[in-house]
Image (cartoon, helix red, strand yellow):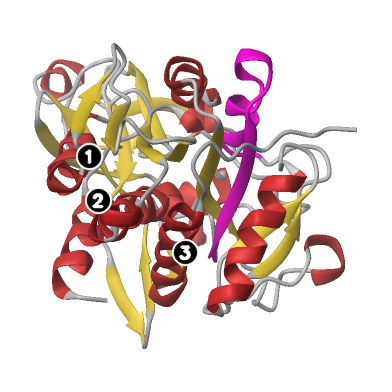
Amino acid sequence: MQNEQLDFLRTLIETPSPSSQESVAQHSWIDYVRPYADRVETDAYGNALAVLHPEGSPKILLAAHIDEIGFQIHYIDDRGFVYFTTVGGSDPLLARGQRVRIHHQGKSVLGVIGSLAIHLQDREGKQEPPKWHELFIDIGARNQAEALERVSIGDLVTYDSGFAHLHGELWVGRACDDRVGAFVVAEALRRTFARRETLQACVIAASTIQEENGLFGATMVGYSTQPDAAVVVDVGHATDIPIADKKRHGDVQLGKGPILSRGSVNHPLLVSRLAEVARTHGIAYQQGIDPRRSGTDADAIFLQRGGIATAALGIPNRYMHSPVEVVHLQDLETLSEWLSLFLGDLKREERFRQAW
């Protein structure tokens, strides 16, 4: 990966933008895609759209969400300890002893989620996970008044974890879900722009908001853009670790390529077309299944306006929804190139419709 692309990826992942507060990360995404689009726009809630070759056909939506999981403050006690609830799906077993950042009026306040020293714990009997309302953040305040000088009810919180090189092509950070997807969509647009002389399709690259809260941004974008087909990029579970049961969750490995799934929202003709492009160009990918739903923005988009042909593509990710998500950079590059080749291979007026 070139330095410019790696710097952009690092900026995306290290920019705190939990659901409902995505604007800072969206600015970075928009700045990157602007040179490769004929038009860039945002909507009322902050979804970002970059349109290339607007007169083309078919109209293809590439979408990935820019928001991340986090927490939100809802109570501060008289001693200045901060209580919070979850934004998106977090694991309470991971929370104790973690550093966090509280985002208050453009500033970042360091805090720690308190943990009772092991010497003081009662270890008899079965240990249950803590309930979220039992956890608290210590920001060093002496009382409630002092805490309220630095943070407020409603402030959003993220884990204090940056983007770091683990080994080889492996990198680790929080919010890889789904900043790596937002990166791939932007990078696919950049590569398609370089091939625009033969491009037949209209391409809408979308960075969506509030996926972790309920696929809200994708619902808006799927309705407003009226695409002929949509490809959603999100992360998928890498199971190449000792504690993952492949018999239950399948076999997905880092560095072996993105995941193309069948079933549920994944339109069979669109899936076949993506697979055809991959075979033609020697693109390595892994196979997955979505027997009931994909768990991504695709679940919202495919239902819009009487049905939109949609496919969900996954980037293998270890330790999802933790502060230490691990991805392989080659998977990102492979998927970016695959999507660009797919867009360039589409014929004018091509459609994906089931017919009997």
Q: Which residues are magenta?
A: 295-318
Q: Is residue 321 magenta?
A: no
Q: Picture coordinates of residue 167 (x, y %)? A: 36, 86
- Spatial CA distance of label 3 from label 2 is 18 Å
**Label 2 crowding class (10 Å Cα cut-off): few <14, some 14-19, many 20+?**
many
Residue 77 placement, left or right of 28: right
Residue 275 placement, left or right of 206: right
Front in this rendered view, residue 151 or 33: 33
Q: Which mark is residue 12?
A: 2
Q: Is residue 63 above or below residue 313?
A: above
Quadrant of the drawing holding the N terminus: bottom left
Residue ID at (27%, 64%): 163
Q: Which mark is residue 25?
A: 1
Residue ID at (43%, 38%): 69
Q: Picture coordinates of residue 250 (x, y %)? A: 78, 66
The residue that mark 3 highlights is 335
